[in-house]
Image (cartoon, rainbow, N blue to C red):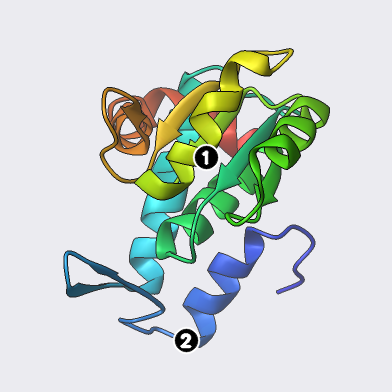
Amino acid sequence: MEITRTFELLDWISEKYQKNDLLAGKKDGEWITYSINDYIKYSTLMSYGFYEIGLRKGDKVVTITNNRPEFNIIDMALSMLGVIHVPIYPTLNPSEYTVIINHSDAKVVVIGIQSIYNRVAPIMDQLIHKPAIYTLDKIGNEKELYEILKLGILSRKKNADIVNEI
């Protein structure tokens, strides 16, 4: 198998290594593991969800999060759509976030945890374009990334052919 696009690594890994703990992260003190099949499933469903909220090839999505499995799933989902992933270190100061997010022209910003949100939220009003905010953890009244996954599940039959053509 020749790999020409990043997300094709998923099929290659699936063929070569059937691991039950390809990705792992702690949530509420418990380890949660993702097999290669989980990785493929969630990445694909997430890509359908991103498509459903209007993201298209060439659009940009910023992620600001600590190291966690969801980052990899988001990265592959965006790659499947041809959406440009703009990961930003979670340790920057607010003025740096303002510059990077403004220059990225992102349509969506995904924020991982409360402490990062506390640094980023104050600058959102200063942005030229107002990207939608989604969070990985439950943070106030912000939309959770889980909503995009649910959209992907609900729209998988409708969007499967569209995403496969990209």
Tell me if 108 is positioned left or right of 159 in this view: right
The local crowd at label 2, few if under 14, some if 14 to 19, many if 20 or more residues have their Cα within 10 Å, is: few
Q: What quarter of the picture does the N terminus occupy?
A: bottom right
Height in image: 92 above or below 45? below
Is residue 119 shown to the viewer in this render?
yes
Q: Residue at x 55, y 66 (%)?
A: 10
Specify which label sits upstream in the sequence, 2 or 1: 2
Distance, label 2 to label 1, CA atoms, is: 39 Å
Task: Give how far across and how far down residue 17 sits, in percent.
Answer: 47, 86
Please say whether residue 166 is visible from this viewpoint. Answer: no
Q: Residue at x 50, y 53 (%)?
A: 65
Residue positioned 59% across, 39% down in the render: 164
Q: What element carries label 1?
A: helix
- Nearer to me, 156 or 130: 130
Callout 1: 10 Å neighbours few (<14), some, many (20+)?
some
The three-letter amino acid code for the residue at tag 1 is: Arg
Residue at mark 2: 17
User: Compared to 38, does 123 lie above or below?
Assistant: above
Vertical side of 123 occupied by 81: above or below: below
* Residue 140 horizontal/vertical position (percent): 26, 29
- Label disc, if present, on residue 19 of the rendered structure: none
The residue to which callout 1 is attached is 119
Q: Which amino acid does label 2 sit on?
A: Tyr
Label 2 vs label 1, nearer the camera: 1
Label 2 residue SS: loop
